[in-house]
Amino acid sequence: MSRSPLEFSLSSRMIKPNRWLNQDWLVLFLVISLVSFGLMMIYSASSSVEMVLRQGIFAVIGIVFMIYLSFSDYQRLLPIYLNVFWIGIFFLLVVLVIPSDAATRRWIDLGIFGFQPSELMRCVLTISAAAFLSRNPRIVFRDWMIVIGVSFLSFYLVFIQPDLGTAIMVLISGILPVLISGFPVSYQIIGIVIILLSTPFIWMNLLDYQKQRVLTFFDPSSDPLGTGWNIIQSQIAVGSGSLFGKGFLQGTQSQLNFVPESHTDFIFAVVAEEFGLFGVMGLFLVYLLLAFRLVMIAKNSNFLFVKLVAGTFIFLLLTYVAFNTAMVVGILPVVGMPLPFLSQGGTALIINMIMIGIILSFRRTV
């Protein structure tokens, strides 16, 4: 006797005939606006037309995936979503065995471009966890423990690359579906206590440069020409933008290359310097409007899968924005988190657009 809920029904669901009119054009407009602004900022930060064109190609690929998935019937794809986790695990193992860079083991060289499996993992882990937890009408404790276990396994495989920032986000992408699905509060408290008690063990297993980043966070001036350089220069860039900024391509800190990695992790510093406080507030408003619109798409659904995927991705989107900006201004240690849709990085851009497309698909069926 099958225990599958309505979510796993493979029966055909009707798609509205006027599917183009039924598309959420506001979400598409907001995403494309962020990506376009990101291309501008990448050019300002790098002065490299080649880098902009490269990111533009990834953007086009991401838009195609996003629109295609937005018209898909997610219920028909549930069996696939349940098993895409294994694809992520496979690539995480591949990058550890045959990385394009033996020092970091984060990338797989595909010739014309590199592929970062950890970015894929934070997507497929959420989707598979949501499909696994929603496959039966009732979630048993064993289901939660399985998802928590594979989440920590995924975290470890990314952590040893080493990539602490992305590893944390991968862990969150697996744990959040557990919490949203009703994991008992008493067990949540036990988990928090265990994590706190594990802090000394985690610290001992950090690499020297990771420990130095944490120490520099507390006192950037202790090594202003070394580990503290990024934070100090980014703070100068942000502060010098004042209210209205210095203007596009007019930022001294970014144009004179005082801010390292200004086209990736520290691109927010370029935005703040060239467009000022009002420009930053406008950027935050776009992110919040995008998140709000995604919430509105999923809020009326009675399907647990929809709530788990949408809730997790929206939280991760806002967390990336908060962590990146906090890192740039020195509120949090430098852990290498890109600003969604703006920072240079093809894999992250495509994955974010895929997740947007999947959430848009939740409104396709009637």
Image (cartoon, rainbow, N blue to C red):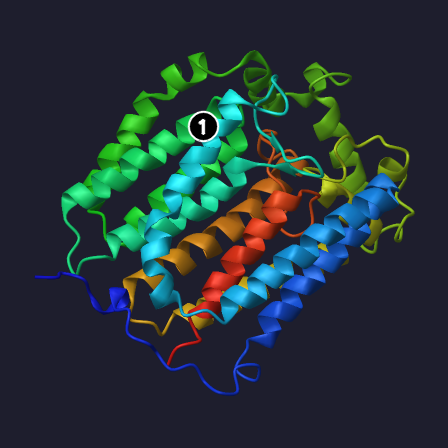
Residue 258: x and y, percent? 84, 30
Horizontal side of 192 relative to 159 (left or right) equals: left
| Residue 273 appears in view | no
Disc 1: which residue: 93
Q: Quadrant of the C terminus?
A: bottom left
Location of residue 312 with respect to 73 vertically, above or below: above
Location of residue 52 with respect to 166 vertically, above or below: below
| Residue 248 appears in view | yes
Residue 48 found in image quarter: top right
Q: Residues within 10 Å of mark 1 (few under 14, many from 20)?
A: some
Give whichever of 227, 26 is nearer the camera. Answer: 26
Residue 54: x and y, percent? 76, 46
Most extreme residue toward the bottom, as rendered?
17
Most extreme residue toward the front, as rendered?
111
Q: Secondary structure at mark 1?
A: helix
Horizontal side of 254 relative to 153 (left or right) equals: right
Residue at horizontal 27 percent and vertical 27 percent from the top: 194
Residue at horizontal 42 percent and vertical 41 percent from the top: 87
Amino acid on which disc 1 is placed = Leu
Residue 213 found in image quarter: top right
